[in-house]
Amino acid sequence: LVASMEGPEETYIMVKPDGVQRGLVGEIISRFEKKGFLLKGLKLFQCPKDLAEEHYKDLKERPFFPKLIEYITSGPVVCMAWEGAGVVASARKLIGATNPLQAEPGTIRGDLAVQTGRNVVHGSDSPENGKREIALWFKEGEICEWVPAQAPWLR
Ligand code: RTP
């Protein structure tokens, strides 16, 4: 997949299976919604193994890779596409450090998690990967291009 860098900045955010099992979906969506980013894709989805492996292909050689794939495919995830200027870096800040014990209070992981292997949410690490991951996880027709009625307040 060659992700085009045209168009507005976008990031792929995913509530991982532990977040879904713990009933944190609404809480996590809320953080991005209240911040003021634009939701353009959203679905509950059981991730197949091959997709999990493609998503995390850069971590293929890491010792925790098999466990990571097992975790991500262990139950449904919530896939989201969010748009906004600076959304990739800002979402990473809202999410907090990979190890929840090192994540600042006020961040999603800082407030809601304790283990690296159960860190409740994923966020793309670059605008390029944002486009790549949205193309990977969503089919054509699942992404809505829209302008919110209150747009003048935020944009
Ligand atoms: P993510 O991609 O999920 O947003 O996480 P990240 O960038 O903060 O962290 P990354 O280094 O890309 O790792 C991806 C996910 O792999 C799991 N992990 N487990 N030592 C471990 O057991 C370990 N290290 C990483 C975590 O679920 C991490 O979010």
Image (spheres, grey):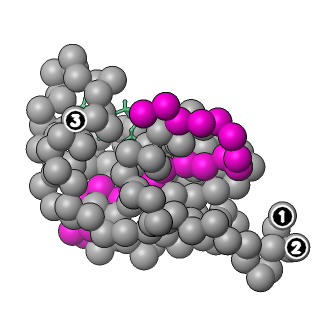
Disc 2 on helix, strand or loop?
helix
| Residue occupying the point 18% across, 29% down | 65
Q: Around disc 2, counting alpha carbons within 10 Å, would you say few (fewer than 14), some (14 to 19), or many (20 or more)? A: few
Q: Quadrant of the N terminus?
A: top left
Q: Which mark is residue 53?
A: 3
Q: Which residue is under mark 1?
A: 155
Mark 2: amino acid: Pro
Q: Around disc 3, counting alpha carbons within 10 Å, would you say few (fewer than 14), some (14 to 19), or many (20 or more)? A: some
Mark 3 CB in 8 Å range of ligand 1? no
Q: Which residue is under mark 2?
A: 152
| Residue occupying the point 79% across, 80% down | 150
Q: CA distance from mark 1 to mark 2?
A: 5 Å
The image quarter containing residue 23 is bottom left
Magenta extent = 1-22
Q: Report the image quarter containing ligand 1.
A: top left
Which mark is first along the chain, 3 or 2? 3
Disc 1 on helix, strand or loop?
loop
Asked whether the beta carbons under mark 2 and mark 3 sit within 8 Å of each other, the answer is no
Q: Verify whether residue 18 appears in magenta.
A: yes
| Residue occupying the point 20% across, 61% down | 46
Q: Verify whether residue 139 appears in magenta.
A: no
Q: Report if residue 96 is visible in the image.
A: no
Furthest-right residue in view? 152
Mark 1: amino acid: Arg
Residue 154 placement (x, y as % from top left): 82, 68
Q: Is residue 15 above or below residue 100?
A: below
Name the residue nearer the viewer: 23 or 88: 88
Mark 3: amino acid: Glu
Residue 116 placement (x, y as % from top left): 29, 40
Furthest-bottom residue in view? 149
Asked whether the beta carbons under mark 1 and mark 2 sit within 8 Å of each other, the answer is yes
Q: Is residue 10 left or right of residue 138?
A: right
